[in-house]
Amino acid sequence: MNKNSSVKTVVAVGIGAALFFVLGRFVAIPSGIPNTNISVQYAVLALLAAMYGPVAGGLIGFIGHTLIDLSWGGSPWWSWIIASAFVGVVVGLFAKSLALSEGDFGKKKMVTFAVANVVANAIAWGVIAPVLDIAIYSEPVEKVFAQGAMAAVANSLTAVIIGLLLVVAFTKTIAKKGSLDKE
Amino acid sequence: MAAKTVLNYLPRKSVVHSLTGTTKLAFFLCFTFASMITYDTRVLAGLLAVSLVCFKLSHIKLREVRFMLVFMLIFLVLNNLFIYLFSPDQGTAIYGTRTVLCHLFWRYDITAEQLFYTLNITLKYFVALPVAILFISATNPSEFASSLNSIGISYRVGYSVAIALRYIPDIQRDYHNISQAQQARGVELGKTEKLWTRLKNAVTILLPLILTSLNRIDVISNAMELRGFGKNPKRTWYTHRPFRTTDYLALALGAALFAVSMTVTLVCGRFYNPFI
């Protein structure tokens, strides 16, 4: 990593965490199921992680989620924060193969992006969050896995649908590599 | 949407406020971990007492933080309700006995063990609450980055957190402007739209927000690059304050609480069992 990109990562983490916070704290899009809102922040987390890599993705999830918890006034709920960070790291691992800054985003990359998000969210909310809930907070097994499964489905859908729409729209704004023709 | 600051800093003249940010952060972490590992009612009660004394010392009034308290209470009630709905016998599973107080219906009995377990969960929430509120409202946000750095976290990460705190109000304002502008053009996010349209409409708001944020990232990182950010392995902080006696005392108290909680957990187990 050269020096310029490391400064950029620092800033991307800061701004990304701020975005994650604002979307997670103040933006509520009703999902149709009572009391359940669409967590758009996970779509944005997916996009930013895919752009800036696993370190940035993980930190955005970690810092953003911690700030949300702190702003609600409780002590941070570490198990879910770690799950958020995990989503960022896993999606970020695909940053190289997605190469969003090149501007072409074909079918193959769409599938990669979708699979990465589903895997990341399924493991994070279906396994990591409930297991840590049991280990740290001794909550009942049935309850945490029911909660986790709901979150896994909701967040994967959000990340895949809104995330894909975002990425496609975003890559259209970038000039493709080799898009200039010699006349 | 009022431009509320995230961490609702309430400046006061008090012992708690005069502690350095580092001390507060370290104490907060020690305390949350201490209350996290144990489920022992006696330890939790002791921690709650310490926590309330700290709150008293800070001269922050209860009504100033009422919003957080109410939110936490709602969350707590909902959580306890869910736990009961999903496993009414969690208390029995933990404490090993089953003392039925009264029968409700189907598999739902009210047992002494379940009530005791619920009491412990409630205690666990309340123990951390005053210290968390204090940490948020008595720490100057600009001191936060330097305190993260001084407990051993890389200053780059500290700086990221500082940037996040600095730009949250800006991004909030951007979001507000963009969503008003789009709503004026007929973009609707409420329940009147179909779910798919709602999602697509969310993207029409999110995309401009992300593009302006990416622009911001470029501008800020260029500015930091120009000022030589990240050149040295260490840096100094404008808001850094030297430690005083009270800081050492607070740190010792935090470490002691953590040690007590850890020893009790290791020696007597996580749960205090009055049933056998």
Image: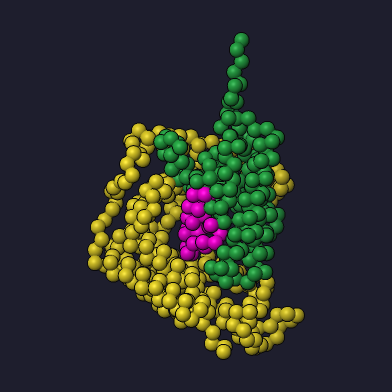
Q: Residue at x 58, y 48 (%)?
A: A90
Image coords of residue B148 (percent x, y)? 37, 54
Percent across and percent down for residue B71 are: 53, 65
- At horizontal 46% and vertical 41% (from top left) the residue drawn is A9
Q: Is residue A59 on the magenta stretch?
A: yes
Chain seen in green? A
The rendered magenta stretch, by its main secondary structure, is classed as helix
In the displayed orientation, state which residue is furthest to the front: B267
Residue at the location (58% across, 30% down)? A102
Q: Quadrant of residue A94?
A: top right
**B252 vs A25: above or below:** below
Query: Residue B269's spot in the image, x, y percent?
Result: 51, 79
Relative image position of residue B271 (x, y in whole percent): 53, 79
Seen from the viewer's position, the closer of residues A132 and A80 is A132
Residue B140 forms part of the magenta stretch: no
The answer to whether residue B251 shows anywhere in this view is: yes
Report the magenta residues as a range.
Answer: A58-82
In the rendered structure, the colour chosen for chain B is yellow
- Judge whether residue B190 can be spotted in this image: no
